[in-house]
Amino acid sequence: MPIAQTTHAAEHPTKTTPSGRVLESAEYISRCSRDVHVPDAGVRQAAQEIMRRMQRTGYSTADWKRHALNPSVADAEALEWIFVVDALNFSFWSANTLQPAEESNNNEEEDDAGGTRSSRQRYTVTLDGTAYTGYWTLCAAVNRALREGTAMTDAAFYSRITEAEAAHVFRTDDAAAQEAIPLLGERVRVLREVGGVLREKYGGKFANLVGQCAGSAQRLVELVVRDFPCFRDEHWFAGRPVQLYKRAQILVADVWACFEGAGLGRFDDIDAITMFADYRVPQALCRFGALQYSDRLLDFLRASERSVRAAGSEQDNHRLTKACPPARPGLLPSGHAWEVEIRGSSVWAVELIRRRIAECGVGVNAVLIDFYLWDYAKDHPEEMQTIPIHLTRSVFY
Protein backbone atom coordinates (compact mmCIF):
# COMPACT_ATOMS: atom_id res chain seq x y z
CA MET A 1 0.00 0.00 0.00
CA PRO A 2 1.47 3.41 -0.92
CA ILE A 3 2.06 5.74 1.97
CA ALA A 4 2.15 9.01 0.06
CA GLN A 5 1.10 10.60 -3.18
CA THR A 6 4.26 12.21 -4.49
CA THR A 7 4.69 14.41 -7.51
CA HIS A 8 8.37 13.76 -8.23
CA ALA A 9 8.54 17.27 -9.67
CA ALA A 10 11.22 18.48 -7.27
CA GLU A 11 12.99 15.60 -5.59
CA HIS A 12 16.15 17.68 -5.25
CA PRO A 13 15.28 21.29 -4.40
CA THR A 14 17.86 23.81 -5.55
CA LYS A 15 19.65 26.21 -3.23
CA THR A 16 17.70 29.06 -4.81
CA THR A 17 14.39 27.75 -3.40
CA PRO A 18 13.53 28.25 0.28
CA SER A 19 13.35 24.51 0.98
CA GLY A 20 16.60 24.07 -0.89
CA ARG A 21 18.19 26.62 1.41
CA VAL A 22 16.81 24.75 4.42
CA LEU A 23 18.16 21.44 3.17
CA GLU A 24 21.59 22.87 2.38
CA SER A 25 21.63 24.56 5.80
CA ALA A 26 20.66 21.30 7.50
CA GLU A 27 23.47 19.40 5.81
CA TYR A 28 25.93 22.11 6.81
CA ILE A 29 24.68 22.15 10.40
CA SER A 30 24.91 18.37 10.64
CA ARG A 31 28.43 18.39 9.19
CA CYS A 32 29.62 21.08 11.63
CA SER A 33 27.70 19.80 14.64
CA ARG A 34 29.74 18.91 17.73
CA ASP A 35 27.05 17.54 20.01
CA VAL A 36 24.33 16.14 17.75
CA HIS A 37 25.09 13.21 15.45
CA VAL A 38 23.12 11.57 12.62
CA PRO A 39 24.45 7.98 12.58
CA ASP A 40 24.28 6.08 9.28
CA ALA A 41 23.31 2.82 10.94
CA GLY A 42 20.58 4.55 12.89
CA VAL A 43 19.20 6.20 9.76
CA ARG A 44 19.06 2.84 7.96
CA GLN A 45 17.31 1.16 10.86
CA ALA A 46 14.93 4.07 11.35
CA ALA A 47 14.03 4.14 7.65
CA GLN A 48 13.11 0.45 7.68
CA GLU A 49 11.06 0.69 10.86
CA ILE A 50 9.27 3.90 9.88
CA MET A 51 8.52 2.56 6.39
CA ARG A 52 7.04 -0.65 7.80
CA ARG A 53 4.93 1.20 10.33
CA MET A 54 3.63 3.73 7.79
CA GLN A 55 2.78 1.00 5.32
CA ARG A 56 1.02 -1.04 7.99
CA THR A 57 -1.19 1.89 9.00
CA GLY A 58 -1.67 3.24 5.47
CA TYR A 59 -0.54 6.67 6.68
CA SER A 60 -1.47 9.44 4.23
CA THR A 61 -2.70 13.02 3.92
CA ALA A 62 -6.18 11.77 4.83
CA ASP A 63 -5.03 11.33 8.42
CA TRP A 64 -4.81 15.12 8.81
CA LYS A 65 -8.55 15.72 8.43
CA ARG A 66 -9.44 12.82 10.70
CA HIS A 67 -8.54 14.85 13.77
CA ALA A 68 -11.65 16.35 15.35
CA LEU A 69 -10.15 19.85 15.59
CA ASN A 70 -8.87 20.21 12.03
CA PRO A 71 -11.24 21.53 9.33
CA SER A 72 -13.34 18.68 7.92
CA VAL A 73 -14.15 20.56 4.71
CA ALA A 74 -11.42 21.80 2.39
CA ASP A 75 -12.58 25.26 1.36
CA ALA A 76 -11.50 28.90 1.46
CA GLU A 77 -12.49 29.23 5.13
CA ALA A 78 -10.26 26.24 5.95
CA LEU A 79 -7.36 28.12 4.35
CA GLU A 80 -7.88 31.12 6.65
CA TRP A 81 -8.11 28.79 9.68
CA ILE A 82 -4.85 27.07 8.74
CA PHE A 83 -3.09 30.40 8.30
CA VAL A 84 -4.11 31.69 11.74
CA VAL A 85 -3.25 28.42 13.47
CA ASP A 86 0.16 28.12 11.81
CA ALA A 87 0.91 31.78 12.51
CA LEU A 88 0.49 30.87 16.20
CA ASN A 89 1.94 27.35 16.05
CA PHE A 90 4.80 27.80 18.49
CA SER A 91 5.93 27.08 22.05
CA PHE A 92 3.46 24.81 23.81
CA TRP A 93 5.73 22.94 26.21
CA SER A 94 5.02 23.48 29.89
CA ALA A 95 7.41 23.83 32.82
CA ASN A 96 4.89 21.82 34.82
CA THR A 97 5.34 18.78 32.60
CA LEU A 98 9.12 18.45 32.94
CA GLN A 99 10.36 15.69 35.19
CA PRO A 100 12.59 12.62 35.12
CA ALA A 101 10.87 9.40 34.08
CA GLU A 102 11.26 7.89 37.52
CA GLU A 103 8.98 10.55 39.01
CA SER A 104 6.00 9.68 36.80
CA ASN A 105 2.97 7.83 38.12
CA ASN A 106 -0.28 6.41 36.89
CA ASN A 107 -2.27 9.55 37.71
CA GLU A 108 -0.39 11.68 35.20
CA GLU A 109 -0.98 12.24 31.53
CA GLU A 110 1.20 12.78 28.49
CA ASP A 111 2.12 16.31 27.45
CA ASP A 112 2.67 17.70 23.93
CA ALA A 113 6.42 17.47 24.57
CA GLY A 114 6.24 13.90 25.82
CA GLY A 115 6.52 14.74 29.53
CA THR A 116 4.02 14.01 32.27
CA ARG A 117 2.30 16.05 34.93
CA SER A 118 -1.17 16.27 36.43
CA SER A 119 -3.43 17.94 33.85
CA ARG A 120 -4.81 20.17 36.62
CA GLN A 121 -1.82 22.54 36.36
CA ARG A 122 -1.37 22.52 32.59
CA TYR A 123 -2.78 24.97 30.09
CA THR A 124 -5.93 23.14 29.01
CA VAL A 125 -8.81 23.93 26.66
CA THR A 126 -11.88 21.69 26.69
CA LEU A 127 -14.12 21.48 23.64
CA ASP A 128 -16.98 19.04 23.05
CA GLY A 129 -16.14 17.22 26.24
CA THR A 130 -12.48 16.60 25.38
CA ALA A 131 -9.71 18.33 27.33
CA TYR A 132 -6.84 19.29 25.04
CA THR A 133 -3.25 20.14 25.96
CA GLY A 134 -0.15 21.09 24.00
CA TYR A 135 -0.56 22.20 20.38
CA TRP A 136 -4.17 21.07 20.27
CA THR A 137 -5.15 23.74 22.80
CA LEU A 138 -4.48 26.29 20.06
CA CYS A 139 -6.85 24.58 17.63
CA ALA A 140 -9.49 24.09 20.32
CA ALA A 141 -9.28 27.73 21.41
CA VAL A 142 -9.63 29.04 17.85
CA ASN A 143 -12.60 26.73 17.21
CA ARG A 144 -14.21 27.75 20.51
CA ALA A 145 -13.80 31.43 19.62
CA LEU A 146 -15.40 30.93 16.21
CA ARG A 147 -18.39 29.22 17.83
CA GLU A 148 -18.70 32.14 20.25
CA GLY A 149 -18.86 34.58 17.35
CA THR A 150 -15.30 35.91 17.50
CA ALA A 151 -13.92 36.44 13.98
CA MET A 152 -10.63 34.68 14.65
CA THR A 153 -10.03 33.88 10.97
CA ASP A 154 -10.76 37.43 9.76
CA ALA A 155 -7.65 39.56 9.31
CA ALA A 156 -9.72 42.70 9.88
CA PHE A 157 -10.28 41.47 13.45
CA TYR A 158 -7.02 39.87 14.43
CA SER A 159 -4.84 42.58 12.87
CA ARG A 160 -6.20 44.84 15.64
CA ILE A 161 -6.71 42.28 18.41
CA THR A 162 -6.05 43.54 21.91
CA GLU A 163 -4.22 41.58 24.58
CA ALA A 164 -7.45 41.38 26.59
CA GLU A 165 -9.30 39.92 23.59
CA ALA A 166 -6.50 37.42 22.98
CA ALA A 167 -6.44 36.43 26.65
CA HIS A 168 -10.15 35.64 26.41
CA VAL A 169 -9.80 33.69 23.17
CA PHE A 170 -6.93 31.62 24.55
CA ARG A 171 -8.22 31.31 28.11
CA THR A 172 -7.52 28.10 29.97
CA ASP A 173 -10.34 26.07 31.51
CA ASP A 174 -9.54 27.09 35.08
CA ALA A 175 -7.49 30.26 35.40
CA ALA A 176 -7.12 29.78 39.15
CA ALA A 177 -5.59 26.32 38.86
CA GLN A 178 -4.00 26.17 35.42
CA GLU A 179 -1.29 27.96 33.48
CA ALA A 180 -2.06 30.60 30.87
CA ILE A 181 -1.02 30.00 27.27
CA PRO A 182 2.74 30.63 26.87
CA LEU A 183 3.93 33.82 25.16
CA LEU A 184 0.54 35.53 24.95
CA GLY A 185 2.17 38.89 24.22
CA GLU A 186 4.14 37.41 21.33
CA ARG A 187 0.99 35.82 19.95
CA VAL A 188 -0.77 39.18 19.97
CA ARG A 189 2.21 40.73 18.16
CA VAL A 190 2.21 37.93 15.57
CA LEU A 191 -1.53 38.20 14.92
CA ARG A 192 -1.29 41.95 14.40
CA GLU A 193 1.71 41.54 12.12
CA VAL A 194 0.31 38.84 9.85
CA GLY A 195 -3.16 40.38 9.80
CA GLY A 196 -1.73 43.74 8.82
CA VAL A 197 0.35 42.26 6.00
CA LEU A 198 -2.62 40.28 4.69
CA ARG A 199 -4.76 43.40 4.62
CA GLU A 200 -2.06 45.55 3.03
CA LYS A 201 -0.84 43.13 0.36
CA TYR A 202 -3.41 40.38 -0.14
CA GLY A 203 -6.85 41.88 0.37
CA GLY A 204 -7.07 40.44 3.86
CA LYS A 205 -7.19 36.83 2.65
CA PHE A 206 -4.58 34.09 2.81
CA ALA A 207 -6.48 32.49 -0.08
CA ASN A 208 -5.34 35.38 -2.28
CA LEU A 209 -1.72 34.67 -1.36
CA VAL A 210 -2.15 30.98 -2.17
CA GLY A 211 -3.75 31.95 -5.48
CA GLN A 212 -0.62 33.84 -6.52
CA CYS A 213 1.57 30.74 -6.26
CA ALA A 214 0.31 28.81 -9.29
CA GLY A 215 0.61 25.42 -7.60
CA SER A 216 4.14 25.97 -6.30
CA ALA A 217 4.89 25.16 -2.66
CA GLN A 218 8.26 26.87 -3.01
CA ARG A 219 6.68 30.07 -4.29
CA LEU A 220 4.30 30.07 -1.33
CA VAL A 221 7.07 29.53 1.22
CA GLU A 222 9.13 32.26 -0.44
CA LEU A 223 6.32 34.80 -0.25
CA VAL A 224 5.53 33.90 3.35
CA VAL A 225 9.11 34.33 4.61
CA ARG A 226 9.54 37.46 2.50
CA ASP A 227 6.41 39.27 3.64
CA PHE A 228 5.85 37.98 7.19
CA PRO A 229 8.89 38.51 9.49
CA CYS A 230 7.55 36.19 12.20
CA PHE A 231 7.93 33.27 9.76
CA ARG A 232 11.54 34.18 8.95
CA ASP A 233 13.25 31.35 10.85
CA GLU A 234 16.88 32.31 10.13
CA HIS A 235 19.94 32.06 12.39
CA TRP A 236 23.73 32.31 12.50
CA PHE A 237 25.70 29.09 12.93
CA ALA A 238 29.37 28.17 12.55
CA GLY A 239 30.26 31.35 10.71
CA ARG A 240 27.34 31.68 8.32
CA PRO A 241 23.56 32.23 8.12
CA VAL A 242 21.28 29.20 8.09
CA GLN A 243 17.58 28.84 7.35
CA LEU A 244 15.08 26.41 8.92
CA TYR A 245 11.63 27.89 8.05
CA LYS A 246 9.64 25.52 10.25
CA ARG A 247 6.33 27.39 10.38
CA ALA A 248 6.40 28.59 6.78
CA GLN A 249 6.87 25.05 5.49
CA ILE A 250 4.32 23.46 7.82
CA LEU A 251 1.83 26.10 6.69
CA VAL A 252 2.20 24.83 3.13
CA ALA A 253 2.12 21.22 4.27
CA ASP A 254 -1.11 21.74 6.23
CA VAL A 255 -2.77 23.29 3.17
CA TRP A 256 -1.60 20.31 1.08
CA ALA A 257 -2.85 17.82 3.66
CA CYS A 258 -6.20 19.53 4.19
CA PHE A 259 -6.94 19.60 0.46
CA GLU A 260 -5.26 16.19 -0.04
CA GLY A 261 -3.08 17.59 -2.80
CA ALA A 262 -5.97 18.87 -4.93
CA GLY A 263 -7.53 22.23 -5.74
CA LEU A 264 -6.04 25.02 -3.65
CA GLY A 265 -3.79 22.40 -2.03
CA ARG A 266 -2.24 21.16 -5.27
CA PHE A 267 1.50 21.81 -5.18
CA ASP A 268 3.54 20.24 -7.94
CA ASP A 269 6.72 20.61 -5.89
CA ILE A 270 5.43 19.51 -2.47
CA ASP A 271 8.15 16.84 -2.28
CA ALA A 272 10.74 19.60 -1.92
CA ILE A 273 9.36 20.63 1.49
CA THR A 274 11.62 19.48 4.34
CA MET A 275 10.91 18.27 7.85
CA PHE A 276 9.63 20.92 10.31
CA ALA A 277 12.31 21.50 12.94
CA ASP A 278 10.75 21.74 16.40
CA TYR A 279 11.37 20.31 19.88
CA ARG A 280 9.21 17.22 19.54
CA VAL A 281 10.19 15.35 16.37
CA PRO A 282 13.83 15.20 17.58
CA GLN A 283 12.53 13.07 20.47
CA ALA A 284 11.04 10.58 18.02
CA LEU A 285 14.20 10.61 15.90
CA CYS A 286 16.25 9.78 18.99
CA ARG A 287 13.81 7.00 19.81
CA PHE A 288 14.28 5.50 16.32
CA GLY A 289 18.08 5.86 16.53
CA ALA A 290 18.43 8.43 13.74
CA LEU A 291 19.64 11.17 16.10
CA GLN A 292 22.21 10.97 18.90
CA TYR A 293 23.21 13.56 21.51
CA SER A 294 26.61 13.86 23.16
CA ASP A 295 26.83 13.04 26.85
CA ARG A 296 27.36 16.68 27.78
CA LEU A 297 24.30 17.77 25.80
CA LEU A 298 22.15 15.03 27.29
CA ASP A 299 23.32 15.93 30.79
CA PHE A 300 22.53 19.58 30.15
CA LEU A 301 19.05 18.87 28.76
CA ARG A 302 18.15 16.60 31.67
CA ALA A 303 19.49 19.05 34.23
CA SER A 304 17.57 21.86 32.54
CA GLU A 305 14.32 19.93 32.69
CA ARG A 306 14.85 19.27 36.41
CA SER A 307 15.81 22.88 37.12
CA VAL A 308 12.92 24.49 35.27
CA ARG A 309 10.49 21.86 36.53
CA ALA A 310 11.53 22.44 40.14
CA ALA A 311 10.84 26.16 39.79
CA GLY A 312 7.48 25.44 38.18
CA SER A 313 7.96 28.34 35.79
CA GLU A 314 10.48 29.97 33.47
CA GLN A 315 12.08 32.45 35.83
CA ASP A 316 14.60 34.95 34.52
CA ASN A 317 17.48 33.03 36.09
CA HIS A 318 16.68 30.11 33.81
CA ARG A 319 17.23 32.16 30.67
CA LEU A 320 20.75 31.68 29.35
CA THR A 321 23.16 33.49 27.06
CA LYS A 322 24.43 31.95 23.82
CA ALA A 323 27.62 30.71 25.46
CA CYS A 324 28.37 27.10 24.50
CA PRO A 325 28.40 25.09 26.63
CA PRO A 326 26.08 27.09 28.90
CA ALA A 327 27.32 27.96 32.36
CA ARG A 328 24.31 26.34 34.02
CA PRO A 329 21.07 24.51 33.18
CA GLY A 330 18.19 26.54 31.80
CA LEU A 331 16.38 27.74 28.68
CA LEU A 332 18.46 27.85 25.51
CA PRO A 333 17.93 31.14 23.67
CA SER A 334 16.65 30.95 20.12
CA GLY A 335 19.70 30.62 17.86
CA HIS A 336 21.92 28.95 20.47
CA ALA A 337 24.41 26.57 18.84
CA TRP A 338 22.92 23.52 20.57
CA GLU A 339 19.40 24.49 19.58
CA VAL A 340 20.46 24.96 15.96
CA GLU A 341 22.36 21.64 16.00
CA ILE A 342 19.30 19.76 17.24
CA ARG A 343 16.93 21.39 14.77
CA GLY A 344 19.21 21.31 11.73
CA SER A 345 20.37 17.75 12.33
CA SER A 346 16.74 16.67 12.65
CA VAL A 347 15.97 18.10 9.21
CA TRP A 348 18.97 16.29 7.76
CA ALA A 349 18.09 13.01 9.50
CA VAL A 350 14.58 13.04 8.04
CA GLU A 351 15.99 13.79 4.58
CA LEU A 352 18.33 10.80 4.84
CA ILE A 353 15.46 8.62 6.04
CA ARG A 354 13.38 9.77 3.07
CA ARG A 355 16.19 8.86 0.67
CA ARG A 356 16.58 5.40 2.22
CA ILE A 357 12.86 4.74 1.92
CA ALA A 358 12.92 5.93 -1.70
CA GLU A 359 15.73 3.46 -2.42
CA CYS A 360 13.27 0.74 -1.42
CA GLY A 361 10.91 1.91 -4.16
CA VAL A 362 8.41 3.53 -1.79
CA GLY A 363 7.23 7.05 -2.57
CA VAL A 364 7.11 9.21 0.56
CA ASN A 365 8.07 12.79 1.25
CA ALA A 366 9.50 14.55 4.28
CA VAL A 367 6.10 16.08 5.10
CA LEU A 368 4.47 12.72 5.80
CA ILE A 369 7.54 11.40 7.62
CA ASP A 370 7.43 14.46 9.89
CA PHE A 371 3.67 14.15 10.45
CA TYR A 372 4.11 10.46 11.27
CA LEU A 373 6.96 11.07 13.73
CA TRP A 374 5.04 13.85 15.48
CA ASP A 375 1.98 11.63 15.82
CA TYR A 376 4.14 8.73 16.97
CA ALA A 377 5.65 10.76 19.78
CA LYS A 378 2.17 11.91 20.79
CA ASP A 379 0.76 8.38 20.77
CA HIS A 380 3.72 6.72 22.57
CA PRO A 381 4.56 9.02 25.49
CA GLU A 382 6.08 6.19 27.49
CA GLU A 383 8.79 5.80 24.85
CA MET A 384 9.61 9.52 25.04
CA GLN A 385 10.07 9.64 28.82
CA THR A 386 13.82 9.10 28.82
CA ILE A 387 14.49 11.53 25.95
CA PRO A 388 14.66 15.17 27.11
CA ILE A 389 13.53 18.07 24.97
CA HIS A 390 15.53 21.25 24.51
CA LEU A 391 13.84 24.13 26.30
CA THR A 392 13.53 27.24 24.15
CA ARG A 393 10.80 29.87 24.02
CA SER A 394 10.57 31.03 20.43
CA VAL A 395 7.98 32.19 17.90
CA PHE A 396 9.62 29.95 15.30
CA TYR A 397 8.35 26.63 16.73
Image: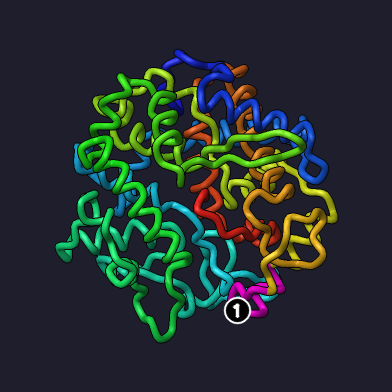
> Is 186 left or right of 294, judged from the image as shown?
left
- Viewer-proximal residue among 117 and 177: 177
> Is 223 left or right of 265, judged from the image as shown?
right
Q: Looking at the picture, does residue 44 appear above or below residue 235?
A: above
For the question of whether residue 315 can be seen, the reply is yes
> Is 244 left or right of 154, judged from the image as shown?
right
SS under mark 1: loop
- Viewer-proximal residue among 200 and 285: 200
Residue 169 percent across, percent down from the top left = 29, 67
Residue 262 percent across, percent down from the top left = 28, 25
Q: Which picture quadrant has residue 186?
A: bottom left
User: As shown in the figure, which amino acid type bears the numbered disc 1?
Assistant: Gly
Q: Which residue shows up at 34% across the image and 76% down it?
A: 173
Q: Which residue shows up at 51% across the image and 27% down it?
A: 18
Q: Residue furthest front?
A: 200
Q: Which picture quadrant has residue 146?
A: bottom left
Q: Looking at the picture, does residue 183 appear above or below residue 48?
A: below
Q: Looking at the picture, does residue 168 appear above or below residue 38?
A: below
Residue 199 percent across, percent down from the top left = 24, 43
Query: Mark 1 sits on what residue?
Result: 312
Give yes or no for residue 306 being in the magenta stretch: yes
- The secondary structure that most of the magenta stretch takes on is helix
Residue 328 percent across, percent down from the top left = 79, 67
Q: Residue furthest bottom?
A: 176
Give yes or no for residue 352 being in the magenta stretch: no
Q: Which residue shows up at 68% across the image and 68% down it?
A: 305
Q: Residue furthest top?
A: 9
- For the magenta stretch, what is the residue range? 305-316
